[in-house]
Each structure stands twice: as C-alpha cells, then as structure tokens.
Image (tube, rainbow, N blue to C red):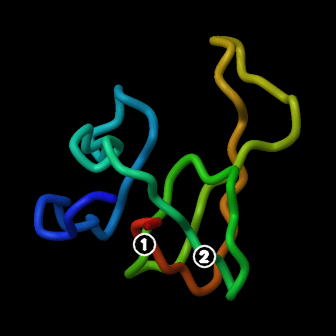
Amino acid sequence: MTDASTRPALPDRLSIDPRSPHHVAAVFEHDIGIRFNGKERFDVEEYCVSEGWIKVPAGKTVDRRGRPLLLTLKGSVEAFYKD
C-alpha cells in the first residue's frame, strides 16, 4: 500500500496523452479513479473537475493520425487515488 503523503496532489485538469500540456507523469505512477455523475468510469482520457467535463473515446473511431476521437461529457467529476 502506498503512503498517502508520497502521492502528488491531483490536478484540476489531467490528460493521459503525454503530448498534452495537462499531462503529469508523477500522478500516473499511482492508480487513479474518476467518478462521473456518481459512477466510476474506466475509459476517461482527460478530465477537468472545475469545469465539470470528461473526454472519452467515441467507440473505435480514430482520426487521421490514428488517435481516438473524443467525446466531451458534462456533469459532476471527482478524481481520487485508489487504495
């Protein structure tokens, strides 16, 4: 079990894409959970707690560079570390 004091604070906005300016590699060394509208989601690519949105892939659809197309869903967002 990881000591809570060694984990960095979760940012307001976070992306799993390493090319994004909102990517924080130190956070991904731990298991993160996202609760959207009271239900835990496992397919979140990016989130923003203060603005209340998440981005999830639109099925198997990809853009011309091979990256998944993302849908923005609005609602209540809560990010947390899994124990």
Q: Give x and y (percent) for residue 69.
A: 72, 36
Give the quarter of the figure containing the C terminus.
bottom left
* Residue drawn at (28%, 50%) of the image: 27
Q: Which label was assigned to residue 59? A: none
Asked if residue 81 lies left or right of residue 24, the reply is right
Determine the secondary structure under disc 2: strand
- Is residue 24 positioned above or below 71 on the image? above
The crowding category of the residue bearing disc 2, from other C-alpha atoms within 10 Å (few below 14, some 14 to 19, many at least 20), is some
**SS at mark 1?**
strand
Q: Which residue, given by chain and number where applicable, does mark 1 sit on? A: 80
Q: Residues within 10 Å of mark 1 (few under 14, many from 20)?
A: few
Nearest the eye: 5 or 62 = 5
In the image, what residue occupies the spot 35% across and 36% down? 20
Pointer 1 and pointer 2: residues touching (CB < 8 Å)? yes
- The disc, 1 or 2, on the residue closer to the chain's N-terminal end is 2
Q: CA distance from mark 1 to mark 2?
A: 8 Å
Q: Disc 1 residue type?
A: Phe
Residue occupying image coordinates x 66% and y 60%: 72
Residue 39's quadrant in the figure? bottom right
Q: In the displayed structure, does residue 77 sit left or right of residue 5? A: right
Residue 26, percent from left and from top: 21, 43
From what the image shows, is residue 1 above or below residue 63? below
Q: Which mark is residue 35?
A: 2
Q: Is residue 69 above or below residue 36?
A: above
Counting from the top left corner in percent of width and height, residue 36 is at 65, 77
Looking at the rendered image, the quarter that the N terminus falls into is bottom left
33 horizontally vs 24: left or right: right
- What amino acid is found at the position of numbered circle 2 in the picture? Arg
At a point 58% along the width and 86% down the height, the residue shown is 76
